[in-house]
Image (spheres, rainbow, N blue to C red):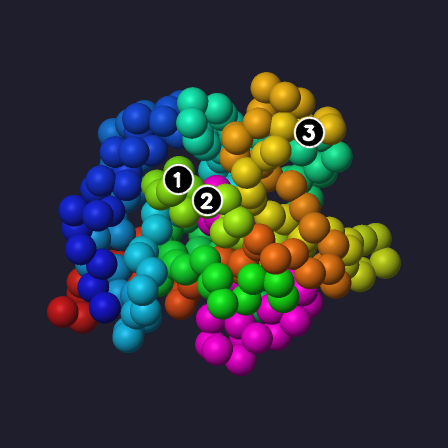
């Protein structure tokens, strides 16, 4: 599938509007150039109901800095206080991020059919389906473009990101994005705001699906596709 140019351009303009270039230390023009290089990128064939998303690589702008750009009902997104180590949540062994400031994630879906599954079981099921789980930076990137994908009772985990412990094992927390109820340490002022938090890897949550995609492509892939055409 060839990703249509207007969608890439529109998503790039959204990032410019939100101030992402400044956070990444580049100009708006440079960000547009990075996005323009993705035009014609060949995404996985036979897409489902999802859409391609212009993802911001965490080495360009960290997820912790990107999250406050989220908005719902006039309230900015936030990271829970007990996830100060967010930047230590890196891609799982089966996820490879393109080496580029911006890249495309194809056929992104929330996978509501897995509401109530455990992250551990969902990861195995996504692999069986030939899908790749979204990382937390990709999940935030998606909501920057489509904030309506965060709905009461239908939010999502991003199990493509996990933190490794010093012994090589995985931290038992899995990152997730949902709507704050404004209770506890979230604070009443954050009621209804987009919330980046975590859930235990072996717990069930009836309001959380598992965001996934068909694949990822970057500038080099787009240039190769153009050359072959």
Residue 154 rendering spot, x and y as whole percentages: 50, 51
Is disc 3 in contact with disc 1, using a CB cutoff of under 8 Å? no
Residue 136 rendering spot, x and y as whole percentages: 55, 48
Q: Residues within 10 Å of mark 2 (few under 14, many from 20)?
A: some
Taking the image as shown, residue 213 lies to the left or right of residue 45, namely right
Which residue sits at x=66%, y=23%? 187
| Element on which disc 2 rests | loop
Is disc 2 in contact with disc 1, using a CB cutoff of under 8 Å? yes
**Along the viewing direction, whichever of 133 and 97 lies nearer the viewer:** 133
Up-down relation of residue 171 to residue 113 (above or below):
above
- Residue extent of the magenta highlight: 118-142
Counting the numbered discs, the total is: 3
Report the residue marked by disc 3: 183
In this view, the residue farthest toward the left is: 229
**Along the viewing direction, whichever of 69 and 200 lies nearer the viewer:** 200
Report the residue marked by disc 2: 150
Residue 36 within the magenta-colored segment of the rendering: no
Camera-near label (3 vs 1) is 3
Report the residue marked by disc 1: 147
Up-down relation of residue 205 to residue 8 (above or below):
below
Q: Residues within 10 Å of mark 3 (few under 14, many from 20)?
A: few
Q: Residues within 10 Å of mark 1 (few under 14, many from 20)?
A: some
Taking the image as shown, residue 173 lies to the left or right of residue 54, namely right
Quick one: quadrant of the C terminus?
A: bottom left
Which residue sits at x=60%, y=48%? 176
**Along the viewing direction, whichever of 208 and 100 lies nearer the viewer:** 208
Residue 36 can be seen, yes or no? no
Residue 98 rendering spot, x and y as whole percentages: 44, 56
Predominant secondary structure, magenta span:
helix
| Element on which disc 1 rests | helix
């Amino acid at each position: 599938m060839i990703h249509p140019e207007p969608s890439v351009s529109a998503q790039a303009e959204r990032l410019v509007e939100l101030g992402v270039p400044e956070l990444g230390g580049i100009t708006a023009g440079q960000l547009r150039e990075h996005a323009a290089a993705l035009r014609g990128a060949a995404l996985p064939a036979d897409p489902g109901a999802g859409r391609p998303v212009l993802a911001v690589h965490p080495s360009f702008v960290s997820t912790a800095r990107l999250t406050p750009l989220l908005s719902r009902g006039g309230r900015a997104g936030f990271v829970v206080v007990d996830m100060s180590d967010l930047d230590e949540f890196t891609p799982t062994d089966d996820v490879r991020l393109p080496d580029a400031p911006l890249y495309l994630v194809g056929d992104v879906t929330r996978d509501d059919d897995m509401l109530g599954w455990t992250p551990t079981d969902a990861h195995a099921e996504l692999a069986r389906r030939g899908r790749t789980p979204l990382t937390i930076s990709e999940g935030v990137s998606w909501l920057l473009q489509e904030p309506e994908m965060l709905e009461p009772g239908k939010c999502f985990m991003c199990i493509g990101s996990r933190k490794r412990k010093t012994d090589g094992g995985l931290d038992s927390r899995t990152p997730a994005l949902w709507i704050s109820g404004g209770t506890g340490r979230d604070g009443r002022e954050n009621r209804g705001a987009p919330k980046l938090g975590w859930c235990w890897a072996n717990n069930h949550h009836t309001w959380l699906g598992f965001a996934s995609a068909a694949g990822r492509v970057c500038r080099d892939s787009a240039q190769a596709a153009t050359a072959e055409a």
